[in-house]
Amino acid sequence: MDYSPLWISLRAAILSTLIAFFLGVCAAGLTQKTGKLTRGILDAFFALPIVLPPTVTGFLLLVVFGNNSVIGQLLLQVGSGIVFSWPATVIAATIVAFPIVYRTSRGAFDQVDKELLSAGRTLGFGEFDIFWRIQLPLAWPGILSGIILGFARALGEFGATMMVAGNIAGRTQTIPIAIYSAVQGGDMETAYFWTAIISFAAILMIWLINLFEPR
Amino acid sequence: MRDRLLSLRIISLVILSLAVIYFAFTQTSTMPIQYTMSYESDGVNSEPTAGKAAPSAELIEPLNEQLLISAAASLKDVLQEIAEIYKSHTPGVAISFNFGASGTLQRQIEQGAPADIFISASPKQMDALESKGMILSESRTDILQNRLVLVIPANADKPASFESLFTVNRLALGDPASVPAGQYGEQVLNTFGLLDLLKAEGKIVLGSDVRTVLNWVETGNADAGIVYATDAFTTEEVRIVESAPEVSHDPIIYPAAVLAKSAGIEIALDFLNFLFSSDAAELFRQYGFTPLNEN
């Protein structure tokens, strides 16, 4: 039994959730300041990875990062390219986790009582302090559930990962890809095993999210 | 006032969705496949197709016969061309293809996919179906032979041989669990003593069928790939650098058979026969296949 899909999946999901967390919270914090129209456009753009079919996301990633593209050629100069490598699993997982963290963070920030923020301003806090010391701590439970949801999504990412990271046993074969491969090859035992693992992880996530949900 | 506008919008959305669904049914084929009892006889006396439910395709020409052929991905271009010729001889037959990795197709059929004919890129998958009684054994015949080659992107010059594959960054290979080209490819790599090395170094990218492997080499996302000679001939974006020695892998034989659960056994047998005709054989040769059992 090859357990590498577990480590590959965990590595991709953890790294991508970390990146999505930073990007998502920053984006959510920044878009608060923008006008309604800009925010609407940015919202739609950031939400794309959730709405697009994963294969489309994967295809677009391939077009942008593939060895034939501008970015791809640059990456080839410094290494062996990003396609079919484990960083590609992180990229794919980040792209799908980011919208989730972004949206829940935005929702969490919106929930924070504006009066408290104003109170901060009267006390002489700068905008960053208001964000960092008032808004973020108060919005934290909501953000946390967003992170967990994003992690769950990153763990289950299949379509985009398949297209851009490929199926390399021991390098980019995540758990969902391992399940797909096992079913293709008729290896039902392996398929059941990984399905059980991921199902257990999913249940754990849901329980954790409920735990941290803001009352 | 606002409520009325909202309900108006909802109703128009529902009507639009229903219209789309209706068109989806009429523009595609959803004729129900009726399973006949399993055939013990010569399979020639099929029931007339009068029992078929009225097709939802009233807006397009009524079809007499429908064939669904599950075939190995490498046969994509040549079979579609052969089907066109067959349809010009035999009007009223609609031929749909389901191309994919032979292993995947085999599992689909085992799970009840309503195919009439199965053509695999290796006897393995056909044997599996035969042992489960899912094909008409009398109809099973080897139809083609193929060769395995190593390809690289057209504008590359390395690697130049199977032997030098240890220098490669990414070698594209069909997933041996379901793709015959991957199974043959592993045999070749084993012969050259490179399989374990490349696997251990994580240099092999597995494709879900041989055309995916080809595409990865075409786009330069893989440095090299192992595909059939016939696949390499379909594109100018790859170069063949070496042909696998015949002794390094099992003979690449494509068996074809009519499936026992086919709803149109007569027409399926007729099409299968056509595949062995000299017209079809000529077309196969043009694409680089070696026809077997030509009539």
Image: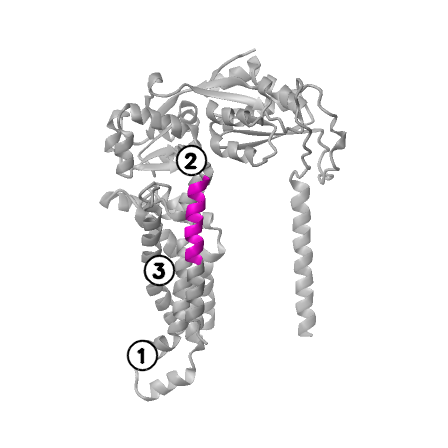
Q: Which residue is mark 3?
A: A17
Badge 3 local density, few (<14 within 10 Å), some, or many (20+)?
Answer: many
Q: Amino acid at mark 3?
A: Thr
Q: Main secondary structure of the magenta part?
A: helix
Q: Is residue A200 magenta?
A: yes
Label 2 in the same subunit as label 1: no
Q: Along the polypeptide, which appears first: circle 3 or circle 1?
A: 3
Residue B192: quadrant of the picture: top left
* Quadrant in the picture for the C terminus of chain B: top right
**Residue at the spot 34% in from the left edge and 80% down from the top edge:** A134
Label 2 in the same subunit as label 3: no
Tag 3, which secondary structure? helix
Circle 3/circle 1 CB separation < 8 Å: no
Q: Position of residue A149 (x, y in %)?
A: 42, 62
- A104 relative to B66, above or below: below
Indicate how the structure is coloured in the image. Answer: one colour
Give, as a single range, the part of the protein colored magenta.
A188-202
Q: Which residue is mark 1?
A: A133
Q: Which mark is residue B212?
A: 2
Whether residue B288 appears in this view of the structure is no
Residue furthest toward the bottom?
A122
Q: Amino acid at mark 1?
A: Arg
Q: Is residue B195 left or right of residue B133?
A: left
- B280 relative to A12, above or below: above
Kindly identify which chain the residue marked by label 2 belongs to. Answer: B
